[in-house]
Amino acid sequence: MVAWNDYKAIARERGALAFEVFVAQSTPVAAPDQVKAVLPDHLAYIQSLERDGKLMMAGPLSDETGDEMQGAGMLVLKAASLDEARALAENDPMHKSGARSFTLRRWLVNEGSISVSIGLSTGTVQLE
């Protein structure tokens, strides 16, 4: 295995941006009606993280078939440390209420691209 900071240094030497984010995968542990009851507070919290610059992306995950929603979700958090990311995830009303549990991992983003198209007169945004 390669130590986290060693791998990060190697990636940067090779020209990658190698920025670190944190991924919280959230899994339902309560009945669906309990999860649904917390949803408005959860969504408000997620919006507050976005406003505060602490959220990169978030949303629900499908089951393995890709056809059904299973109630699980993923948060990609921007934080200064694993401890800060954990605190952000723990404060999500879904997790505080016990409706969902989460696992947290560091993610060193090395490859990929994001394109954004903004329609000024139409007020549209398209991610590719």
Image: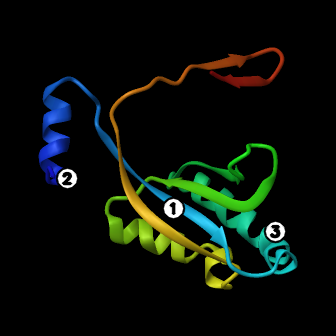
Q: Position of residue 1 (x, y in %)?
A: 15, 52
Cα–Cα gap, marks 3 and 1: 19 Å
Identify the residue at image location x=62%, y=78%: 95
Q: Position of residue 28 (x, y in %)?
A: 69, 72
As drawn, 13 above or below 101: above
Q: Which residue is mark 1?
A: 24
Q: Which quadrant: the C terminus?
A: top right
Identify the residue at image location x=33%, y=59%: 80
What is the number of callouts on the image?
3
User: Disc 2 vs disc 1: Cβ atoms closer than 8 Å?
Assistant: no
Front residue (pair 43, 63): 63
| Residue 4 marker | 2
Front residue (pair 121, 45): 45
Q: Could you tell me the amino acid type at mark 1? A: Ala
Q: Which residue is mark 3?
A: 40
Q: Residues within 10 Å of mark 1 (few under 14, many from 20)?
A: many
Q: Could you tell me the amino acid type at mark 3? A: Pro
Ranked by sequence position, the earlier of labels 3 and 2 is 2
Ranked by sequence position, the earlier of labels 3 and 1 is 1
